Amino acid sequence: MRRIYLDNNATTPLLPEVFEAMRPFFRDHFGNASSIHSHGQQTRAAVENARESVAALLGCRASEIIFTSGGTESDNLAIAGVARPGDHIITSSIEHHAVLHACRHLGEAGCEVTVVPVDGRGMVDPADVKRALRPNTRLISIMMANNETGVLQPVEEIGKIAAEAGVFFHSDAVQSAAKVSIDVNRIGCHSMSISGHKIHAPQGVGALYVKKGTELRPLFYGGRHERSRRAGTENVPGIVALGKAADLAKQALHRGDDRKTAASRDRLEQGVLAQVEDANINGDGAMRVPNTTNIRFDGIEGEALVIALDLKGLAVSTGAACSSGAIEPSHVLLAMGLNKDQARSSIRFSLGKQTTDEEIDFALALVPETVARLRELSPSYRKQVLST
């Protein structure tokens, strides 16, 4: 059976060039990057080259990049590494659970936390962030792009608010890195999280940008790795892979590949909406990353549609991969004002570098017929149609 993968916001396949770059560091170049002999210095050079590449992707200095195990660790380090008991933190209702749960934990540990809302498009209003400021506000953490809807947040405006208030600003860029151009200095953030497996590098590696001079307390204690900010022997193959993926991403953005991806995404959206009644785009009207669309199909269960499509060879999702199997509907879609039934009927399609026009055609042929079949089996939808 032909299998098409349109769930790249959950994880991306490893690009061949990335695999080839990391391959030697599993066996031939195995030295500990902290060792002073030639084996160690060889891997140290590879780590520092990767640091330069990641810094170039984000528009910062190489010395401002900390390598981590992924987006969750980067988020936790950025938040817990800055906030102290008695401090006030501002975040939003649509953040990834890596941010929301970290803030909740700090709230239980003596911090004050304010969660600002979003509008029907899924966007944070910078004015709400400004109104939430208090004398003891220490940190604002607002994501750059939402993982479920792809909606881009007004991070530059929020960065200016943070700067005027003298408050640290962190942005989770896990779903925006490699999809849109990023310049941390223009955004004005003090820290930014990215994850390797969202940009065609392997799972288990990530990075955190930390602006020079930003106070950061480590989560781990041990050696003086990563300038004493993240103890533990470096994952050299993963770091090399992340560096190569960052290089490829920067080249792709320079070529304008993001515009091609957006055109493919738009063709998928328009084709689905033209063929399926009672379908709507969640986040419509807002700027989004080019690879993501979240479509609501009224009258069906999203998980049933995911399973039905998978049985026919198309992989999509109902939202965040780390929340799959959750009983409750998406907290992101509920925050946008959807009711529980609407949230449960929503599907995320997310394209990757490997997505082809033929794969979009396959999805456009499969999705409408599958939705129609599920609606025929749905008593509530049939009743709704008969009453209109």
Image (spheres, grey):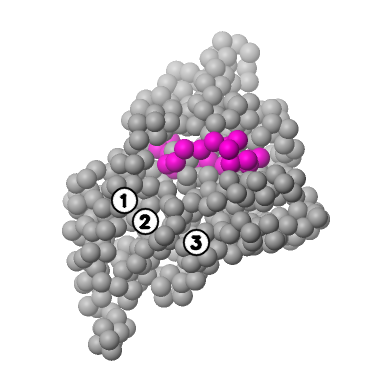
Q: What percent of the width, then of the height, locates residue 299?
A: 32, 76
Residue placed most toward the observer, 102 or 122: 122
Residue receiving disc 1: 265
On screen, residue 46 versus residue 212, left or right, reads left
Residue at 56%, 59% (x, y): give it.
124
On screen, 271 above or below 168?
A: below
How many numbered markers are drawn?
3
Quarter where residue 48 is shown: top right
Residue placed most toward the observer, 154 or 374: 154
* Mark 3: secondary structure: loop
On screen, 244 above or below 29?
A: below
Q: Is residue 68 visible?
A: no
Q: Which residues are magenta?
A: 179-204
Residue receiving disc 3: 122
Residue receiving disc 2: 293
Callout 3: 10 Å neighbours few (<14), some, many (20+)? Answer: many
On screen, 75 above or below 325?
A: above
On screen, residue 364 versus residue 28, left or right, reads left
Cα gap from disc 1 to disc 2, whole angstroms: 7 Å
Q: What percent of the width, then of the height, locates residue 69?
A: 56, 39
Looking at the rendered structure, the kind of residue marked 3 is Gly
**Mark 1 vs mark 3: which is more N-terminal?**
3
Residue at 66%, 28% (x, y): give it.
225
* Mark 1: secondary structure: helix
* Mark 2: secondary structure: strand
| Residue projecting furthest to the top | 38
On screen, residue 286 versus residue 104, left or right, reads left
Q: Magenta includes 181? A: yes
Q: Quadrant of the C terminus?
A: bottom left
Asked if the residues shown at circle 1 and circle 2 are in contact, with their CB atoms under 8 angstroms apart, the answer is yes
Q: What percent of the width, then of the height, locates residue 44?
A: 57, 19
